[in-house]
Image (cartoon, grey):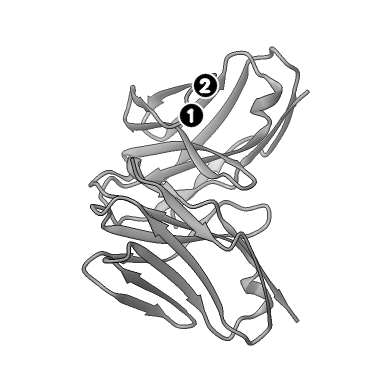
Amino acid sequence: DVKVTQSSRYLVKRTGEKVFLECVQDMDHENMFWYRQDPGLGLRLIYFSYDVKMKEKGDIPEGYSVSREKKERFSLILESASTNQTSMYLCASHAGQTGNTIYFGEGSWLTVV
Amino acid sequence: GENVEQHPSTLSVQEGDSAVIKCTYSDSASNYFPWYKQELGKGPQLIIDIRSNVGEKKDQRIAVTLNKTAKHFSLHITETQPEDSAVYFCAATASGSARQLTFGSGTQLTVLP
């Protein structure tokens, strides 16, 4: 089974702190994604990556950056956390062909105070 | 870009009854429509998907129908059980890349014993 692991499930950070959310997948997938999930808004794409060191902005990239130095690892970075970034963050991976399953991690709950 | 609307946002049914969740999409070029189930505290998991060259697909108690003319697709769950209680997301994509997977806002299904 494909496994997408988000190392931090619950975090509480202060406004202005730098936050790293780490994600690792074990199936050699080309594509990796970071989504944000908020009630009533569904899943919104923040950034995605289709190869090592390659990244593209999603629908809501403002306030976020990403890093993909190795194929299996995709990190989401909040340079200066703000309270409106309190949310559930979901990492996902995908083998690169339409119709292939997207596999999600368990999510990281971030609270910014 | 693609816009996916999902209804209803909440749905309660009695155990054993059927549940139907509907989604509409805007981009007539969309050709792949997956459905995801998200249980409490977990990431979404693919439960069924359909491509635009098929009108209906069934997997045990779950079925999905697609009406390309009207640009809507629906999830049907028959003989509902308490373990079907979860949030369900529809999604649509029009290209060969998973990047353009657009999600609906989700439906909280509650199956009452």
Secondary structure under the numbered disc 1 in the rendered image: loop
Q: Which residue is mark 2?
A: A64
Q: Residues within 10 Å of mark 1 (few under 14, many from 20)?
A: few
Residue B7 % position (x, y): 54, 62
Q: Is residue A26 above or below residue A16?
A: below
Q: Is residue B100 above or below residue B77?
A: above
User: Which corner quadrant of the image does residue A84 belong to?
Assistant: top right
Separation of disc 2 and disc 1 at Cα?
A: 9 Å
Amino acid bearing label 1: Ile
Q: Are marks 2 and 1 on the same chain?
A: yes
Q: Residue at x 38, y 27 (%)?
A: A70
- Chain letter of mark 2 equals A
Secondary structure under the numbered disc 2 in the rendered image: loop
Left or right: A28 as drawn, with respect to B103 = left
Amino acid bearing label 2: Tyr
Let me know if residue A29 appears in the view.
no
Residue A36 % position (x, y): 55, 37
Left or right: B62 as drawn, with respect to A70 = right
Q: Residue at x 78, y 23 (%)?
A: A113
Q: Please tell me which residue lies in front, B111 or A8.
A: B111
Q: Are the residues tagged 2 and 1 within 8 Å (C-beta)?
A: yes
